């Protein structure tokens, strides 16, 4: 299965904030959309990814003042991207090697979606169930 197929099923809704959005605003967006990360944008391009984990890791050092910090102060700016033509195995490897749970999808330099570890797990389970059913059908015919 390709990333493009995942996005067709999931949709291409991208939740993003501008670099100067406060952490407090980001937390409100994460809660509202029940997601774990947002894309941080500058001039229409991804400049970083800000996740719940990034925020939690900064909390011991910054305390309550963290809520007023801008998104770009905490975001991961070394963004790893995938493309719509990538397959499940390649994105699983990317996520594992880079220890990330959110993978922005770019097509010709344009952000077209986000694939999460939850999407990968969902599709791997569906594949396994399909394979199991195919084997049951094969055995029943034999």
Image (spheres, helix red, strand yellow):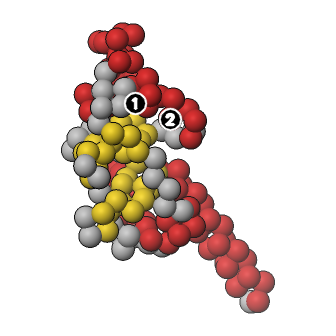
Q: At which x and y percent is residue 6?
A: 51, 66
Assess disc 1: are there few (<14), some (14-19) or many (≥20) residues with their C-alpha within 10 Å of its C-alpha: few
Q: At which x and y percent is residue 20?
A: 30, 32
The residue beneath circle 1 is: 53
| Residue placed most toward the observer, 1 or 132 | 1
Which residue lies at the image location 39% right of the left edge and 25% below the top edge?
23
The residue beneath circle 2 is: 29
The secondary element bearing badge 1 is classed as helix
Q: Disc 1 versus disc 2: distance between alpha carbons?
A: 15 Å
Can I make out residue 124 in this image? no
| Residue placed most toward the observer, 138 or 99 | 99
**Residue that sits furthest to the front in the current view:** 43
| Residue placed most toward the observer, 23 or 126 | 23
Q: Is residue 82 above or below residue 28?
A: below
Q: Is residue 69 above or below residue 99?
A: above
Count the marks: 2
Assess disc 2: are there few (<14), some (14-19) or many (≥20) residues with their C-alpha within 10 Å of its C-alpha: some
**Residue that sits furthest to the bottom in the current view:** 142
Q: At which x and y percent is residue 70?
A: 30, 27
Q: Is residue 132 above or below residue 93?
A: below
Which residue lies at the image location 30% right of the left edge and 45% below the top edge?
41
Q: Is residue 39 above or below residue 58?
A: below
Which residue lies at the image location 39% right of the left edge and 18% below the top edge?
67
Q: Of marks 1 and 2, which one's residue comes earlier in the chain?
A: 2
Which residue lies at the image location 26% right of the left edge and 45% below the top edge?
42
**Residue that sits furthest to the right in the current view:** 140
Q: Quadrant of the rendered structure where residue 128 is? A: bottom right
The secondary element bearing badge 2 is classed as helix
């Amino acid at each position: 299965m390709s990333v493009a197929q995942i996005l067709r099923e999931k949709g291409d809704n991208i939740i993003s904030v501008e670099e100067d959005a406060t952490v407090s605003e980001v937390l409100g967006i994460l809660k509202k959309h029940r997601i774990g990360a947002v894309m941080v944008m500058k001039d229409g391009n991804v400049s970083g990814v800000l996740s719940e984990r990034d925020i939690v890791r900064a909390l011991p050092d910054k305390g309550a003042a963290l809520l007023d910090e801008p998104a770009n102060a905490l975001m991961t700016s070394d963004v790893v991207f995938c493309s719509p033509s990538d397959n499940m195995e390649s994105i699983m490897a990317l996520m594992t090697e880079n220890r990330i749970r959110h993978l922005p999808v770019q097509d010709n330099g344009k952000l077209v979606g986000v694939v999460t570890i939850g999407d990968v797990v969902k599709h791997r389970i569906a594949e396994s169930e399909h394979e199991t059913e195919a084997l049951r059908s094969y055995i029943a015919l034999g």
